[in-house]
Image (spheres, helix red, strand yellow):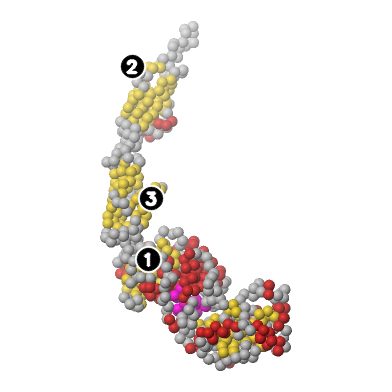
């Protein structure tokens, strides 16, 4: 656009012109004032230029432009020829509609107005986007459009529509392509004033995987993600996925290290994948070769267990991995594996970051995922394994879901993990799944699998909140023969009225081996699934010294025995020579000598001689062992205070 005069006179310019000298004071009467503008309306074209307005005046006058037209209309000059002329300038009309402005000419007492009408400018429209290939599963895209007119948007296919208009552009919603074939459509953006002024964007979309039997999942895995994927092929097969493509790159480290290895130029990593039989195999391969087919339904990411609650460790690694994936798989959605809190007795160094507090660690994990993952555009799914595990810990499994205090147990923990993945990703019900890692590990209790499903379903419904078990609570037991126990206590020289029996949890088919560690050996945490000893014992949980105070009575019914296994510290082994032996005495009083140098006790309960037990005999163990706390240590001396303070069973 030409500038010069236009720019210099952009501000309102007021010119005054003197027709002639004012009459000198004297006896002559003043001349009658004249101001006449013969033409009151002028039309000009759309381009910039000037216009002369003729007028007659015999007094000084001014010419001004109306406020609503000052942006494009201005007074350039006034001059006297045979009559007077006001020259106005106007700028090029950038809009495709006419515009009007008023020039006001005013002398001492008279006023005339002239309307200037400028023709419409040319319509323009620019689409600041190239043709697009979009996600087969459907998506929304934003197309920036610049125009000097109202825009009419016309998609030529019903699977595309305008969702909304934002400051960033036109938001276009695109449906999933479930036709089984590629498709192409055009979105036309045209000027309302001149439909011939338009721009188009072509949208291409590959067919989506709508085969109900096909699912393709790729993960960048640490050990926590590996836990989930081991049982996943079998679980998904039961959900009807007969055409599975599952794979993961193993970089057993935090997100930053994963990103560094995964995103390096010509990165070659260990790649694990399933064959047609669902068996895992592995090969060293280029990352780009695995990404290249661009047919993955989801790519799954996750942080290490230790850093799962540290959201400061999320952003950089996630960004780098996502950028690398997007180079080959532009529109694949991501899912986030939300990890779990350590076992409460874990001695792992990473636990210190959470003050060795399982609940604090779980809360930190939830907060990190809500801050960094929830609602983010790249992540379509959150897999709430951490919540499923925490839910399951409120059931009879209690805090026995890891094999080492950190990683999930080979059967129950991993199965809960896999079921959470399956339901979170597919949305399908898991209620009919019957798969177990090894049926031998589940034959002891028929309700192990339903308890896992209850925890998983609750986690999917409430992914950031613990939901306590309803149907599979821990078995809190007391001695079945209360009268017989009282007689035994009396016969041993104690007054039963001075004691309160503590409800305890009995875990069937389980035992401690303190000479190895403080980890409970069970059929459901995978630590001793093939061990014949499982059929011989049931166990309690571990009691710290404060929970079995001096003066407590340990009672076992005739025909049974217990071993009060012991540790100085959790996570350590006890020397064979120091391990307590089996006890068959009906009543034993806890003394300083009984505790000795130990700080923790856990009880293995069995029939005398520890024979293998049937299921009914295992169930009978619930009522043959009891712990009686002196009322004197319970503050107010009654059961109403039980559960307060240090009493946490």
On the question of residue 137 being in view, the answer is yes
Q: Earlier in the sequence, mark 1 or mark 2?
A: 2
At mark 2, the secondary structure is: loop
Region rendered in magenta: 400-416
Which numbered tag is attached to residue 163?
3
Location of residue 146 in the rendering, given as x and y in whole percent from the top left corner: 35, 45
Above or below, comparing residue 644 to residue 553 in the picture: above
To which quarter of the image does residue 433 belong? bottom left
The residue at the point 56 percent across, 76 percent down is 474
On the question of residue 312 being in view, the answer is no
Residue located beneath label 1 in the image? 298
At mark 1, the secondary structure is: strand
Q: Are marks 1 and 2 in contact (CB under 8 Å)?
A: no
Above or below, comparing residue 276 to residue 616 in the picture: above
The residue at the point 45 percent across, 75 percent down is 414
To which quarter of the image does residue 468 belong? bottom right
Above or below, comparing residue 46 to residue 22 in the picture: below
Along the line of sight, the residue nearer the viewer: 177 or 271: 177
> In the displayed structure, does residue 646 sit left or right of residue 318?
right
Mark 2 to mark 3: distance in Å?
64 Å
Q: Earlier in the sequence, mark 1 or mark 3?
A: 3
Along the line of sight, the residue nearer the viewer: 111 or 481: 481
Residue located beneath label 2 in the image? 82
Residue mark closest to the camera, 2 vs 3: 3
> In the displayed structure, does residue 642 sit left or right of residue 263?
right
Mark 1 to mark 2: distance in Å?
84 Å
At mark 3, the secondary structure is: strand
Q: Quadrant of the C terminus?
A: bottom right
Location of residue 289 in the rendering, given as x and y in whole percent from the top left corner: 30, 69
Location of residue 505 in the rendering, given as x and y in whole percent from the top left corner: 58, 79
Q: Earlier in the sequence, mark 2 or mark 3?
A: 2
Along the line of sight, the residue nearer the viewer: 504 or 632: 504
């Amino acid at each position: 656009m030409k500038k010069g005069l236009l720019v210099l006179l952009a501000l309102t310019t007021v010119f005054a012109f003197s027709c002639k000298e004012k009459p000198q004071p004297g006896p002559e009467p003043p001349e009658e004032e004249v101001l006449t503008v013969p033409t009151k309306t002028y039309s000009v074209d759309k381009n910039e230029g000037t216009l002369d307005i003729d007028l007659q005046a015999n007094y000084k006058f001014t010419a001004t432009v109306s406020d609503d037209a000052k942006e494009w209309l201005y007074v350039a000059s006034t001059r006297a020829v045979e009559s007077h002329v006001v020259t106005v300038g106007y700028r090029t009309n950038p809009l495709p509609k006419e515009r009007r402005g008023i020039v006001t000419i005013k002398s001492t007492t008279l006023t005339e107005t002239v309307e200037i009408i400028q023709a419409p400018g040319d319509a323009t429209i620019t689409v600041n986007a190239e043709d697009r290939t979009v996600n087969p599963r459907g998506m929304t895209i934003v197309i920036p459009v610049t125009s000097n007119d109202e825009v009419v948007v016309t998609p030529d296919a019903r699977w595309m529509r305008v969702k909304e208009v934002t400051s960033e552009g036109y938001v276009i919603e695109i449906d999933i392509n479930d036709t089984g074939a590629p498709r192409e459509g055009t979105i036309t953006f045209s000027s309302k004033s001149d439909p011939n002024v338009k721009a188009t964007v072509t949208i291409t979309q590959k067919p989506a995987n709508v085969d109900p039997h096909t699912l393709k999942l790729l993960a960048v895995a640490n050990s926590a993600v590996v836990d989930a994927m081991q049982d996943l092929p079998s679980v998904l097969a039961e959900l009807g996925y007969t055409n599975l493509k599952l794979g993961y790159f193993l970089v057993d480290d935090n997100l930053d290290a994963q990103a560094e290895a995964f995103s390096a130029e010509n990165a070659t990593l260990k790649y694990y994948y399933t064959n047609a039989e669902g068996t895992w195999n592995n090969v060293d391969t280029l990352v780009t070769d695995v990404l290249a087919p661009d047919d993955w339904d989801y790519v799954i990411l996750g942080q290490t267990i230790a850093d799962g609650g540290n959201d400061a460790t999320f952003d950089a690694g996630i960004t780098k991995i996502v950028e690398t994936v997007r180079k080959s798989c532009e529109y694949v959605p991501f899912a986030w594996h939300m990890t779990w809190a350590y076992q409460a007795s874990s001695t792992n160094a990473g636990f210190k970051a959470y003050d060795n507090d399982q609940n604090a660690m779980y809360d930190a994990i939830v907060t990190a995922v809500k801050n960094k993952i929830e609602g983010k555009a790249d992540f379509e799914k959150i897999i709430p394994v951490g919540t499923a595990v925490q839910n399951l810990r409120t059931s009879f499994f209690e805090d026995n879901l890891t094999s080492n205090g950190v990683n999930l147990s080979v059967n129950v923990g991993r199965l809960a993990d896999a079921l959470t993945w399956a339901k979170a990703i597919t949305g399908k019900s898991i209620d009919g799944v019957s798969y177990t890692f090894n049926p031998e590990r589940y034959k002891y209790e028929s309700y192990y699998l339903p308890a896992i499903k209850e925890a998983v379903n609750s986690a999917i419904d409430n992914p950031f909140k613990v939901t306590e078990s309803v149907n599979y609570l821990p078995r809190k037991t007391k001695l079945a023969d209360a009268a017989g126990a009282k007689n035994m206590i009396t016969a041993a020289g104690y007054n039963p009225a001075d004691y309160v029996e503590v409800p305890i949890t009995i875990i069937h088919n389980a035992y401690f081996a303190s000479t190895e560690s403080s980890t409970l050996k069970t059929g459901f945490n995978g630590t001793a699934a093939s061990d014949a000893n499982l059929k011989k014992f049931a166990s309690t949980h571990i009691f710290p010294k404060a929970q079995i105070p001096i003066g407590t009575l340990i009672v076992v019914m005739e025909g049974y025995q217990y071993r009060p296994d012991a540790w100085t510290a959790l996570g350590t082994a006890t020397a064979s020579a120091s391990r307590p032996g089996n006890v068959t005495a009906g009543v034993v009083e806890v003394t300083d000598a009984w505790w000795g140098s130990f700080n923790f006790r856990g009880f293995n309960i069995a029939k005398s001689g520890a024979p293998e037990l049937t299921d009914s005999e295992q169930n009978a163990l619930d009522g043959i062992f009891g712990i009686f706390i002196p009322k004197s240590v319970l503050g107010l001396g009654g059961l109403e205070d039980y559960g307060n303070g240090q009493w946490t069973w």
